[in-house]
Amino acid sequence: MANASAESAGLTWLLFAMMTVVSWGLYGVFLHSGQIGMADIVNGRYKAFLFVGIAYLLVAVIGSIIMLFVGGASWTFTAKGMGWSLIAGVVGAIGAFCVLLAFGAKGSPAVVMSIIFAGAPIVNAVVALMMHPPAGGWSSLRWQFIAGIILAALGGFLVTMYRPGTAPAAKPTAAIEHHAGGGQ
């Protein structure tokens, strides 16, 4: 019984990771819908982003405050922790803003988000390795890790190159019938 409890507690991170996958997977489609729903071709993306910011206020600020109170946390913060957290928030907000700019430049949500979700793990892996080099040196990286980086890049490329398009233009049937029937 204790093992089952430990195993389920050990996989809680996976549940939260999958919830993030679903949330971020929906993000681009919903954000694009919000931009379109603003019915403002010029400023709709900025109006949508304003409401993304309001959502962050509600979820990130108010939610964190509630969790800190409930958890009985101290209200002391280190400069290093605040600095890195602010940088993380800024790069996250810039990324969200750039998603809207990509949509505004006629990128489709399916392709834009596929490129982002293929490219972001590559950037994450490279930066994490630069900030925290592997204990055995760069040569200790396993081939499976390198293959994963290559496959992520390949996946983003393939989704972009072979994205579903619009239906092919219908062939004019009258002209086909005319030629097929021997008409002049």
Image (tube, rainbow, N blue to C red):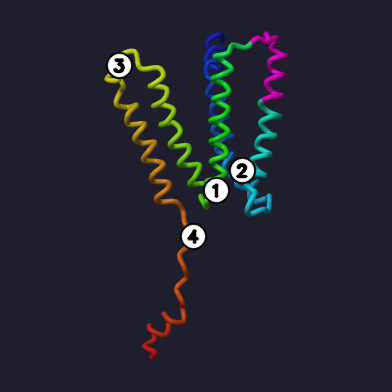
Residue type indicated by callout 4: Thr
The residue that disc 2 covers is 31
- Residue at 56% x, 8% y is 2
The residue that disc 4 covers is 166
User: Between tags 1 and 2, which lies in front?
Assistant: 1
User: Between tags 1 and 4, which lies in front?
Assistant: 1
Q: Position of residue 131 (x, y in %)?
A: 41, 19
Q: Does dot 2 land on a helix, a strand or a loop?
A: helix
Nearer the observer, 130 or 184: 130
- Image quadrant containing the C terminus: bottom left
Q: Does dot 1 land on a helix, a strand or a loop?
A: helix
Residue type indicated by callout 3: Gly
| 99 over 141 or under it: above or below | below
Label 1, label 2: how far apart the Cα atoms are: 9 Å
Task: Please report whichever mark, 3 or 1, sits nearer to the chain's N-terminal start.
Answer: 1
Q: Position of residue 68 (x, y in %)?
A: 69, 15
Label 2, label 3: how far apart the Cα atoms are: 41 Å
The residue that disc 3 covers is 137
Q: Does dot 3 land on a helix, a strand or a loop?
A: loop
The residue that disc 1 covers is 103
